[in-house]
Amino acid sequence: MTGDIEEKNKIEDNKKDLNLEELKKQLEECQKLKEEYLAGWQRARADFLNYKKEEMERIGEILKYAAEEFILRILPVLDNFEIVEKKLPENLKNDENIKGLLQIKTQIQDFLKNQGLEEIKTLGEKFDPNLHEAVEEIEPSFVKASAGKEIKSGIIVEEIQKGYKINGRLLRPAKVKVIK
């Protein structure tokens, strides 16, 4: 009987060893699955954060584009103020009503400047096809030179319509007259 009990104990010990080995294998499999799931979750989280960042940039670009469209619609109003101011007779320049209207022009300019709009320099500058649109070429003989200054080809002598850049990017080229 003691032999039977010893044999039963050995069998139970073997079963425990098998169960222990089986449990170790299951634990190793669980560890591998945990690492796979954790790595997958981390990749998914990183992908989501990248997606979120890209979406914010895309929305920012859409808002910039919308602002540009809005500004392009306001520029003709500003152009009309410029035309009126140029053609205003001297005797009306000190009129309070006219000064009030021209103050509206200044407010529009300030608003647009705050939106990132900047005027393109033209008069006396070298013609740049990236910033300027030549509407006419003038013979040097028709241009009066300042005392001691030479008239050079490709210099802008008159601005027909102001050009603008927004946030460093061309919004509308300046329409100019250039010396041949």
Image: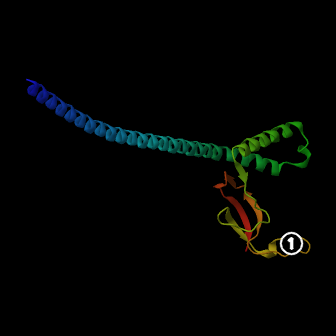
- Counting the numbered discs, the total is 1
Q: Is residue 17 left or right of residue 152?
A: left
User: Residue at 62% across / 46% down in the picture?
Assistant: 68
User: Residue at 76% across / 43% down in the picture?
Assistant: 110
User: Residue at 86% across / 40% down in the picture?
Assistant: 99
Q: Work out which residue is located at the far top of the displayed protein and give it.
A: 1
76 versus 2 height, above or below: below
Query: Which residue bears the numbered disc 1?
Result: 145
145 versus 96 height, above or below: below
Q: Is residue 96 left or right of residue 126?
A: right
Q: Nearer the viewer, residue 8 or 166?
A: 8
The picture quadrant where one finds residue 20 is top left
Q: Quadrant of the C terminus?
A: bottom right
- Mark 1, Cα crowd under 10 Å, few <14 / some 14-19 / many 20+, is few
Type of residue at label 1? Ala
Q: Which colour scheme is used?
A: rainbow
The picture quadrant where one finds residue 66 is top right
User: Residue at 64% across / 55% down in the picture?
Assistant: 169
Q: Quadrant of the N terminus?
A: top left
Residue 9 placed where, x, y %? 16, 28
Q: Which of 146 and 118 is in front in this view?
A: 118
The picture quadrant where one finds residue 38 is top left
Residue 71 placed where, x, y %? 65, 45
